[in-house]
Image (cartoon, grey):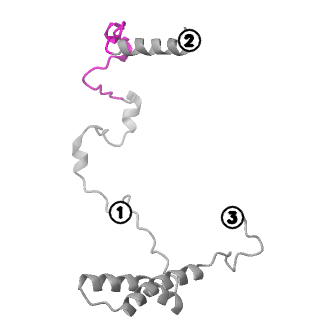
Amino acid sequence: MTPQSDEDEVWRQIVASFNDTAERDSADQPWPDSENVSPEPTRRVVRPPEEDLDRLPAPLADPLDDSLDDREPDDDEGHFEPPPPPPLPKLDLPTKLAWVALFGGPAYLLIAAMASWQMEGWALFAAVAAFIGGFVALVVRMGDGPPNDSGWDDGAVL
């Protein structure tokens, strides 16, 4: 018998016994009493010692009492107001023109197509060139060097 035929026989046995029930049913196993849970939750009442009752300023409130939930919540409780964001950096004229060209070219083509305008060849070329030129101008102006005020130690530069 070859190892392949042994493996085939094992697989045939697994497939043949796929729908058989297990020999040991989980219902036959004993359930430990410590795992049994009562259907009603237990309430614990903690009473202070008798000598401490004289020092209490007011009676203790029942933690399950819903009348405390009728109070008005404090307006400022848990409210976080973030600080105002820093102002946007000032853009110079070439950067503004590059952004206008980047979005203006496709916007013109979209509006012209939706309005069924007759597009001349030069207008189509200008819109596509504006888009490509705006993208190239923004990538070139992006700069990949360290900031000018970083000092003598650039830290971990990747």
Amino acid carrying label 3: it is Leu
Q: Residue furthest front?
A: 1
Please name the residue that numbered disc 2 is placed on. 2
Contact? badges 2 and 1 (CB < 8 Å): no
Q: Main secondary structure of the magenta part?
A: loop
Please name the residue that numbered disc 3 is placed on. 158
Q: Marks 3 and 1, how far apart in space? A: 45 Å
Front position in the image: 152 or 104? 104
Tell me residue 10's x, y (percent).
46, 12
Please name the residue that numbered disc 1 is placed on. 76
Identify the magenta region.
19-46
The quadrant where residue 116 appears = bottom left
As displayed, is residue 41 above or below residue 31?
below
Which numbered disc, 3 or 1, marks the residue closer to the eye? Answer: 3
Dot 2 alpha-carbon crowd within 10 angstroms: few under 14, some 14 to 19, many 20 or more: few
Front position in the image: 21 or 60? 21
Judged left or right of residue 120, residue 139 is right
Tell me residue 7's x, y (percent).
50, 15
Earlier residue among tags 3 and 1: 1
- Image point (38%, 16%), residue name: 15
The quadrant where residue 143 appears = bottom right
Residue 20 magenta-highlighted: yes
- Image point (48%, 82%), residue name: 132
As displayed, is residue 67 above or below residue 12?
below
Residue 92 visible from this viewpoint = no
Dot 3 alpha-carbon crowd within 10 angstroms: few under 14, some 14 to 19, many 20 or more: few
Tell me residue 60's x, y (percent).
32, 38
* Helix, strand or loop for disc 3: loop
- Image point (23%, 85%), residue name: 115
* Helix, strand or loop for disc 1: loop
- Image point (28%, 20%), residue name: 38
Q: Quadrant of the N terminus?
A: top right
